[in-house]
Image (tube, rainbow, N blue to C red):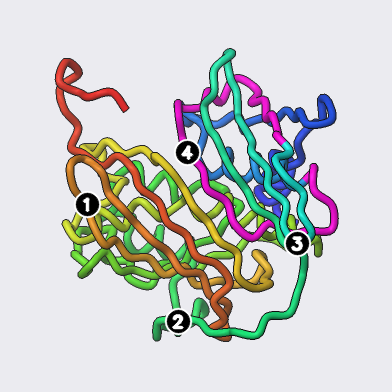
């Protein structure tokens, strides 16, 4: 198992403080705020640890304040309901005495359904035909912004192989459509809840960037102010996050300083396993005295 994957599993392994109270840590990196996917994944872990024999099938969350990576995050779980087929949990993430994130999650027993359909997977090259991180750094290094170069040089738990890499270099994509293959850089335990929490962590990595792609911009551009406002995720079918998954993005709308993005996540064989949606702040950086507060 790679050290980065071990680190990811470590930050998702919350400390139980009380029956419904958990504490999570952040990796000590150079980031000035906690990565949003980390809080999503940790909050989902907290919710899962209060539910037995049911897997999460959906979550809806709001980012309230930026997280401080130097301070532990407290997750307070409310057991809203346990019904015959579904359970509902609410999770509040707290730092410095204030809420920074709120999540609602729903859990479902395994049952057979009478109806089964899905959208088809985009026709894209397989991950083996795309450049790994090492080749990306070699081929595109001189063309990439410094922030993007640093990102691809990091030891990361999630490997990404973009299909339309030129979008990072200013190429516009209609309707914000782009695709990236993702998987962990090492094997994961077999527990399906681990795979769902890891995917929840990964879905925040590239989603908001879809709102910039129609404009030939990217969130690696230092002239853009961006922050996730909310996040919604639905799990449809079983999958493994340590196998390649295609993350297909689009952005139906951007307006009034906000961008809206969607994602569909497929296994290699074209099975739709999850759907995701997010709205976030996307605006050009303004002088300090002219910046609206989130």
Structural distance between the alpha carbons of marks 3 and 2: 26 Å
**Residue beneath label 1, please?**
254
Residue at numbered disc 3: 85
- At x 55%, y 35%, the residue is 102
Task: Judge whether 194 appears above or below 275 on screen.
Answer: above
Mark 4 or mark 2: name the one nearer the start of the chain.
4
Q: Position of residue 72 (x, y in %)?
A: 65, 23
Task: Give the secondary structure at mark 3.
Answer: loop
Q: Earlier in the sequence, mark 1 or mark 4?
A: 4
Pointer 4 with pointer 3, Cβ within 8 A: no
In this view, the mark in front (3 or 2): 3
Which of 223/228 is in front?
228
Disc 3 from disc 1: Cα separation: 38 Å
Q: CA gap, disc 1 to disc 4?
A: 19 Å
Mark earlier in primary sequence (3, 2): 3
Residue that extends furthest to the front in the rendered view of this protein:
84
Q: CA distance from mark 2 to mark 1?
A: 24 Å
- The mark closer to the camera, 4 or 3, is 3
Circle 1: element type: strand
**Which contiguous range is marked in magenta?**
49-78
Which residue is identified by label 2? 119
Q: Is residue 218 left or right of residue 111?
A: left
The reply to whether the magenta stretch includes residue 64 is yes
Residue 244 included in the magenta stretch of the image: no
Name the residue located 30 percent from the left edge and 46 percent from the top edge: 219
Does the residue at mark 4 contact the one at mark 2 (Cβ under 8 Å)? Answer: no
Q: Say left or right for 253 vs 209.
A: left
Residue 259 higher or lower than 99, as above or below: below
Residue 9 point in image, percent of width and height: 72, 47
Q: Which residue is mark 4?
A: 62
């Amino acid at each position: 198992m790679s050290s980065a994957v071990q680190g990811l599993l470590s930050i998702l392994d919350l400390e139980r403080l009380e029956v419904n109270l958990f504490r999570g840590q952040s990796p000590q990196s150079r980031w000035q705020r906690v990565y949003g996917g980390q809080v999503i994944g940790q909050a989902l872990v907290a919710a899962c640890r209060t539910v037995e024999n049911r897997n999460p099938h959906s979550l809806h969350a709001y980012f309230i304040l930026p997280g401080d990576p130097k301070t532990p995050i407290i997750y307070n779980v409310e057991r809203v309901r346990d019904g015959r087929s579904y359970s509902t949990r609410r999770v509040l993430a707290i730092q410095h005495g204030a809420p920074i994130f709120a999540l609602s999650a729903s859990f479902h027993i395994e049952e057979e359904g009478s109806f089964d359909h899905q959208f088809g997977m985009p026709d894209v090259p397989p991950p083996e035909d795309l450049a790994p991180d090492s080749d990306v750094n070699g081929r595109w290094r001189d063309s990439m912004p410094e922030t993007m170069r640093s990102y691809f040089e990091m030891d990361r738990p999630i490997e990404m192989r973009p299909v339309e890499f030129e979008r990072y270099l200013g190429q516009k994509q209609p309707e914000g459509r782009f695709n990236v293959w993702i998987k962990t850089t090492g094997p994961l335990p077999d527990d399906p809840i681990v795979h769902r929490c890891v995917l929840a962590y990964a879905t925040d990595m590239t989603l908001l960037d879809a709102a910039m792609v129609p404009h030939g911009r990217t969130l690696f551009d230092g002239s853009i102010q961006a922050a996730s406002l909310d996040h919604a995720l639905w799990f449809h079918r079983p999958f493994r996050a340590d196998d390649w998954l295609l993350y297909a993005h689009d952005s139906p709308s951007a307006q009034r300083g906000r961008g809206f993005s969607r994602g569909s996540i497929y296994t290699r064989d074209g099975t739709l396993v999850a759907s995701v949606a997010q709205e976030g702040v996307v605006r050009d950086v303004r002088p300090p005295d002219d910046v609206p507060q989130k």
